[in-house]
Image (cartoon, rainbow, N blue to C red):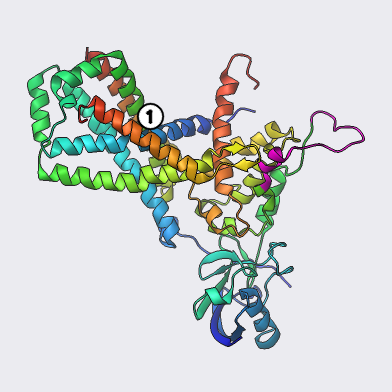
Amino acid sequence: MSRNPYVRPVSKTTWYMRNGRYKKYMLREVTCLLVGFYSFFVICALGILAAGSPEKWESFLASQQNAFMVALHAAALLYFLVYMTFDWFKLAPKAMPVQLGEQKLPDLYIVLAHYVAWFMVTAIVFWLAGVI
Amino acid sequence: MSIRQLEIEVLRYDPEQDSEPHFKTYEVPCEHDWAILDALNYIKDELDTTLAFRWSCHMMVCGSCGMMVNGEPCLTCKTFVRDLPDKVRIEPLENFPIERDLVVVLDDVMEKLQMAKPYIIRKDPPPEDKEFTQSRSALYKFKQYTMCVNCMCCYAACPQYALDSSFIGPAVLALAHRYNLDSRDQGKSERLDILADHDGVWNCSFVGACSEVCPKSVDPAAALQQMKIDGAKEFWLQKLPGGKS
Amino acid sequence: MAIAKKSVVWGLFAAGGTVTAFLFPALIALFLMVATGHVPEGLDYANLHAFAAGWFGKICLFFVISLALWHAAHRLRVVFHDFGVRKDKIVAKAVYLIATIGTVLTAYYLYVIR
């Protein structure tokens, strides 16, 4: 008997097409593009703000008001919520389990705590921005 | 109970004759309460005695019957015919070389298991003439990780291990974490080597598939994230004045 | 035993991920409001300028933007790896450099706004 183990090939570029679990993971990972995009979007806005001219700021805001930007932001918001925020909260109990005595605190409580905190944080941002 | 005819495709590979694996189909009359392992045993006993596969306990303890069933890594003794469609495809665990048929080469993981130092390490002498005491709450901190039967389904599910087999991988790292969490153990700093290394926890990108497929409900993905947090904390602690190095 | 630099990068990634998961939906929602023409009053020039000029606003903006950038950079590095690009050293340098540039720009703009 001679050994001759067979190694199955794995595609380095398309491996994630193998199952839904991997596809979902990739959809989550590419949210980094949104984070990067919006970070630089805010930096650009800061740059315009730093120019110190109210007119420039007003024209910047005016330039943002079109159907394309509405669609872009709406799609980004939806995608980000589903694949980043909700996913992050869902996975949080794994990274930070809480044990009370002999019992592990059910994951649901940790997830719910995240949602409560998220509502509060969002409310604070909206309050600072004068939305509410 | 009634007999159900199942069409079972099995990946076959004979290292002495085949240049690559190929599927062979068997018609198996399955009883209602059979697991896939029973169907495999039927094939071996009644249809084709040359089929090679590993199994031992048939009760989810030995961890040797891990295979891919319709693309999902699972223990075949725990995967029931009644939960499957009429056509079933059985392959050896992914991400491991095929030794023969459904038997895979596990040498890589066995070597990595040594690196994790999966045993209690003491710096202080153990208590004399009596056993270590451990509270129940201290036990429950790591108990789930002791359930691992080394079936390696998590390795078959892990794409990062598939892409780069130098990654130590889910089960072994979870086992290292299990000893790190043990109140009797003092070897955490020794195990830090594998944790801090590039091939350690940092190759994990939290796909989470390992935990989803684990037949024993162990959560290796959780262990890995906790080890990352530990590693990040440890780094800053070392930077503190008087920190250990 | 020195712990790999990766633990630092990962720490920033995790912190940034938490910050973005909590804050970015609200942030994108604000942009959405602007785009629909309902500009929140907090985004008026006077109000926003006053916010960014104060120390509280500066600290908030700096930490949120820099952590988000580091989070995005690190995850992008992994994304490159996952899509089969195996030049990790170059990818890492590029993405962290971009994040650093963004961080420096943020610091500069916040310094100018007063």
Confirm whether the magenta stretch covers residue B140. yes
Q: Quadrant of residue A35?
A: top left
Q: Which region of the structure is painted magenta?
A: B123-143
For the point 34% across and 36% down, the residue is A119
Between A2 and B24, the one lying in front of the other is B24
x 33%, y 25%: residue: C103
Q: Is residue B148 magenta?
A: no
- Who is closer to the viewer here, A95 or C6? A95
| Front one among A77 and B67 | A77
**Position of residue B230 in the picture relative to residue A62 (left or right):** right
Q: Position of residue B217 (x, y in %)?
A: 60, 55
Seen in the image, is B108 located left or right of residue B159?
A: right
Expressed as whole percent of the image width and height from the top left, the position of residue A18 reads 44, 62
Seen at 14% across and 24% down, the residue is C44
Q: In the rendered structure, which amino acid carries the disc numbered 1? A: Leu
Instruction: Tell me: A46 left or right of B49.
Output: left
- Hey, which residue is sitting farthest right in the picture? B129
Whether residue C93 is visible, yes or no, is no
- Rendered image quadrant of residue A56: top left
- Of residue B40 and residue C52, the one placed in the foreground of this image is C52
| Residue B98, quarter of the rendered image | bottom right
Q: Quadrant of the N terminus of chain C?
A: top right
Residue at the disc numbered 1: C67
Position of B90 compared to C72: left or right?
right
Q: How many marks?
A: 1
**Which secondary structure, mark 1?**
helix
Would residue B45 be visible to someone looking at this image? yes
- The main secondary structure of the magenta stretch is loop
Counting from the top left corner in percent of width and height, residue C51 is at: 23, 18
